């Protein structure tokens, strides 16, 4: 049976990013469905406090954020590559461009529809995105930003290429694709807004057909049992004296843009874009939780 276990819910645009990665690589994986809102006790037992999804589990190693998941999938299953043009560095950097595109879509969704959300769901999302004034979204600016980002995609496809990096799909496609995917389905007026971008529409359809690999259902209890019966893989840790980070130091890691939850533990993995902390919980045993460095704040606790 496959080693890949994905903790997720399908309505999440970030889950859709990883599903398309699995589709590109044609991988078999086990699916653990998590709630959209707290309580998320099973997930938090595994991560140590991080509530966001998707989360990829491989034995007793837990991978946070779609960019870190992409890095792990590419390492374990290098072909077909998520970087068909060989430009891995600039593609990873473009994840933050895709996040900016997502933020424009999120503002548009909040401004146009959040007054109709269930009260409990709205309160939860307000806590998750504390920098957004849910009652004061500038819809004109949000639409303007959506047009600008969609225009970049349309321009990139202008030479007739099938995908953003060329003939084959890659990481940049799946990260960008999720914004029109969720806004077309949930935000009134988006189809009209995107109407001039015909190449983008055809590209969206091509990305959608990449599928999600082969999904096998799995329970949270089964996934936690896998972690308990496994040991984390060996890690490499390079000291970062400038930021007072070294092997074994207790640290807290948290997103720098949302309140998805912080994780504390012993630092066991560190490089220019990797943070790994070891922690324990009675339900999963000892695990290592891996984050990308980009977009995450590391705070020494010792």
Image: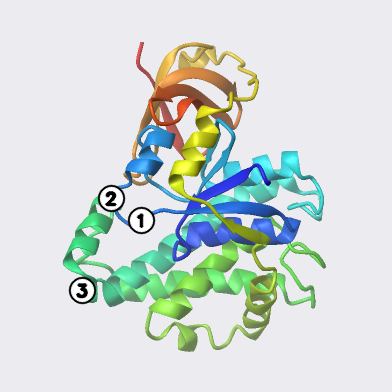
Confirm or deny contact between disc 3 and disc 2 (CB under 8 A). Answer: no
Whether 48 is drawn above or below 177: the answer is above
Q: Is residue 166 left or right of residue 286?
A: right
Task: Return the residue nearer the eye: 212 or 284.
Answer: 284
* Left or right: 259 in relation to 172: left
Q: Residue 153 vs residue 254: left or right?
A: right
Is 118 placed left or right of 265 in the picture? left
- For marks 3 and 1, give the one nearer the viewer: 1
Closer to the observer: label 3 or label 2?
2
CA neighbours of label 1 inside 10 A, class few (<14), some (14 to 19), many (20+):
some
Q: Is residue 293 visible?
A: no
Q: Are marks 3 and 1 in contact (CB under 8 Å)?
A: no
Name the disc covering residue 115, or none: 3
- Give the class, few, some or many, for how many residues have Cα within 10 Å of label 3's Cα (few <14, many ≥20): few
Is 283 in front, or is 148? 283
Mark 3–mark 1 Cα distance, whole angstroms, equals: 22 Å
* Residue 281 percent across, percent down from the top left: 39, 26
Q: Which residue is mark 1?
A: 35
Q: Position of residue 120 (x, y in %)?
A: 19, 61
User: Where residue 14 sits: x, y (%)?
Assistant: 50, 57
Q: Please give the label number shown on residue 38.
A: 2
3D distance between C-alphas at marks 3 and 2: 21 Å
Q: Helix, strand or loop at disc 1?
A: loop
Instruction: Give the class, few, some or many, for how many residues have Cα within 10 Å of label 2's Cα (few <14, many ≥20).
Output: few
Q: Do residues under tags 1 and 2 come within 8 Å of each other at their CB atoms?
A: yes
Q: Position of residue 191 (x, y in %)?
A: 48, 86
Residue at point 38% right, 35% down? 45
> Distance between the Cα atoms at labels 1 and 2?
7 Å
């Amino acid at each position: 049976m496959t080693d890949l276990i994905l903790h997720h819910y399908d309505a999440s645009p970030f889950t859709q990013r990883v599903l398309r990665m699995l589709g590109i690589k044609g991988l078999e994986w086990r699916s653990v469905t998590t709630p959209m809102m707290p309580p998320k006790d099973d997930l938090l037992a595994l991560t140590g406090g991080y509530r966001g999804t998707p989360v990829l589990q491989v034995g007793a190693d837990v991978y946070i954020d779609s960019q870190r998941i992409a890095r792990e999938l590419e390492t374990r299953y290098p072909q077909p590559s998520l970087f068909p043009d060989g430009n891995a560095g600039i593609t990873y950097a473009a994840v933050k461009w895709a996040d900016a595109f997502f933020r424009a879509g999120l503002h548009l969704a909040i401004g146009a529809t959040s007054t109709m959300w269930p009260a409990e769901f709205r309160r939860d999302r307000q806590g998750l995105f504390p920098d957004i004034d849910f009652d004061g979204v500038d819809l004109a600016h949000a639409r303007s930003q959506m047009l600008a980002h969609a225009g970049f995609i349309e321009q990139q496809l202008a030479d007739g290429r099938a995908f953003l990096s060329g003939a084959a799909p890659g990481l940049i496609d799946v990260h960008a694709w999720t914004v029109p995917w969720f806004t077309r389905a949930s935000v009134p007026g988006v189809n009209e807004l995107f109407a001039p971008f015909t190449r983008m529409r055809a590209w969206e359809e091509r990305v959608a057909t990449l599928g999600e690999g082969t999904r096998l259902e799995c329970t949270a209890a089964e996934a936690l049992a896998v972690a308990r019966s496994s040991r984390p893989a060996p890690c490499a840790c390079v000291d970062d004296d400038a930021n007072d980070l070294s092997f074994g130091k207790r640290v807290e890691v948290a997103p720098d843009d949302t309140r998805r939850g912080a994780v504390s533990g012993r630092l066991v993995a560190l490089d220019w874009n990797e943070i790994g902390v070891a922690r324990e919980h009675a339900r999963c045993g000892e695990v290592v939780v891996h984050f990308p460095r980009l977009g995450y704040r590391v705070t020494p606790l010792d």
